[in-house]
Image (cartoon, rainbow, N blue to C red):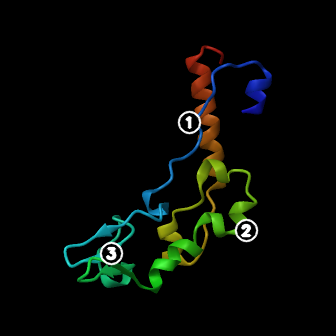
Amino acid sequence: MEKFLLKNYKQVIDDLRCKTCYVESMSQFVISYDLSVYKCTARDFVPINSIGMINSDGDFIQNNHYYDYYVNSSYEQDKCLKCKFLPSCFGPCIQKVIERSQNECNQHDVFEYIINKVKLYLLQKNIL
């Protein structure tokens, strides 16, 4: 972006980042018919994936699995925090990290995505 601004481009390219998943939002939950609570709708609603329950008073009672979503966030991982692409990718899928207990990096894919977005923008402006 700095290089574009130094070349006096007036249009700001603001859509260079991959979209973050709703699961990363700590205020997002899915409540099942039996009042069990989940984070990710791309997984089965089974007890092992539950992060807690809604009790008879309507309060959310989280289980230990709930905290996995905090400690496994990309913003809690040194590897991600040191990466220059973190503002563009937001790290790997948190659900997959929790399930596999590993942090897979998709740095190459993010770089390619950014390059393609810049090329598309330049083509649209008849610069390339």
Please state the horizontal and vertical placement of residue 61, each as a whole percent of the image. 37, 82
Residue shown at the point (29%, 75%) measured from the top left: 45
Disc 1 to disc 3: CB gap under 8 Å: no
Cα gap from disc 1 to disc 3, whole angstroms: 32 Å
Residue shown at the point (27%, 83%) measured from the top left: 55
Q: Which of marks 1 and 3 is in front?
A: 3
Per the rendering, the mark at residue 15 is 1
Please state the horizontal and vertical placement of residue 75, each as a whole percent of the image. 64, 64
Per the rendering, the mark at residue 105 is none
Three-letter amino acid code at disc 2? Answer: Asp
The local secondary structure at tag 3 comes to: strand
The local secondary structure at tag 2 comes to: helix
N-terminal label among 2 and 3? 3
Looking at the image, residue 127 sits to the left or right of residue 23; the answer is right
Three-letter amino acid code at disc 3? Answer: Val
Which corner quadrant of the image does residue 13 belong to?
top right
Looking at the image, residue 59 sits to the left or right of residue 71; the answer is left
- Up the image or down, 87 lies above or below 43; here it is above
Which corner quadrant of the image does residue 27 belong to?
bottom left
Per the rendering, the mark at residue 78 is 2
- Crowding at dot 1, Cα within 10 Å, few <14 / some 14-19 / many 20+, comes out as few
Please state the horizontal and vertical placement of residue 112, each as a whole percent of the image. 63, 43
- Up the image or down, 91 lies above or below 44; here it is above
Instruction: From the image, tell me which residue sits under label 3.
Output: 37
